[in-house]
Amino acid sequence: DAKTTQPTSMDCAEGRAANLPCNHSTISGNEYVYWYRQIHSQGPQYIIHGLKNNETNEMASLIITEDRKSSTLILPHATLRDTAVYYCIVRVNTNAGKSTFGDGTTLTVKP
Amino acid sequence: GAVVSQHPSRVICKSGTSVKIECRSLDFQATTMFWYRQFPKQSLMLMATSNEGSKATYEQGVEKDKFLINHASLTLSTLTVTSAHPEDSSFYICSASGDRGIGDLHFGNGTRLTVT
């Protein structure tokens, strides 16, 4: 799986958009970008994934650069409940179990 | 959809005893489940892959005789920590791939194991 780099921590004001970056410069053509988050003392939660097109669902939007070397997860209106560790994972979609969880980004949403 | 239930959520046991953790896929069938361990302020580390009807595949450095995995049905995998020691105290999490074929993982809420 391609290695990813994320900032250690970020703050965001409640109600504002949270933009979480991820660098994956060694991504292969058949590797997807997956995002998960882990709220304290809970299991991780799947958020969104994409290959090369931008994606949006009820939780977030995923913007992938044209060269696919980086991506941004966008939480459009962050709430206090979005405070969590966010993991960006790059892998082929048929090998879910081999997801490598790095250190992620600790997002703190502040009132 | 794709709900994974894990039980118990927390358990305290004495050193030398064994503890069983259950992981169930509630609304889908999971031929493969995954077990992770997470120490405080660290990320998840894959311990083993649980395959329905066959032996589990363990990651390097994980003792298969200490962490017994059974995946007897398409909706249940169990992890038994045998002869637990205080250093086994950790947060254990299971997951399963969703059934939409998109490679999404769905996780249980974890089990906090404390060995005294």
Image (cartoon, coloured by chain):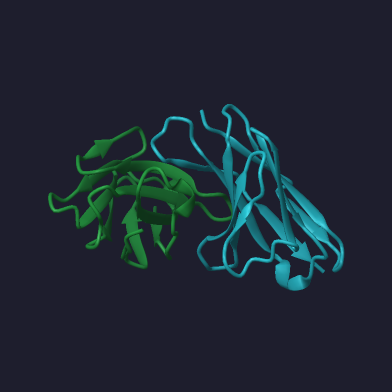
Residue A70, quarter of picture? bottom left
Residue A28, percent from left and from top: 25, 55
Residue lying at the far left of the rendered structure: A66
Residue lying at the far front of the rendered structure: B54
Up/down of B82 relative to A35, above or below: below
Residue A35, percent from left and from top: 37, 49
Foreground: A106 or B28? B28
Residue B47, percent from left and from top: 60, 59
Foreground: B31 or B21? B31
> Residue at coordinates 40% horizontally, 56% vertically from top-left?
A87
Left/right of residue B39 with respect to residue B111 in the rendered view: left
**Which colour denotes chain A?**
green
Residue A70 seen: yes
Up/down of B18 relative to B88, above or below: above
Residue A76 seen: no
Residue B78, percent from left and from top: 72, 46
Q: Quadrant of the N terminus of chain A?
A: bottom left
Figure label count: 0
> Residue at coordinates 48% horizontally, 45% vertically from top-left?
A45
Foreground: B101 or A8? B101
> Residue at coordinates 26% horizontally, 57% vertically from top-left?
A21
Q: Which chain is cyan?
A: B
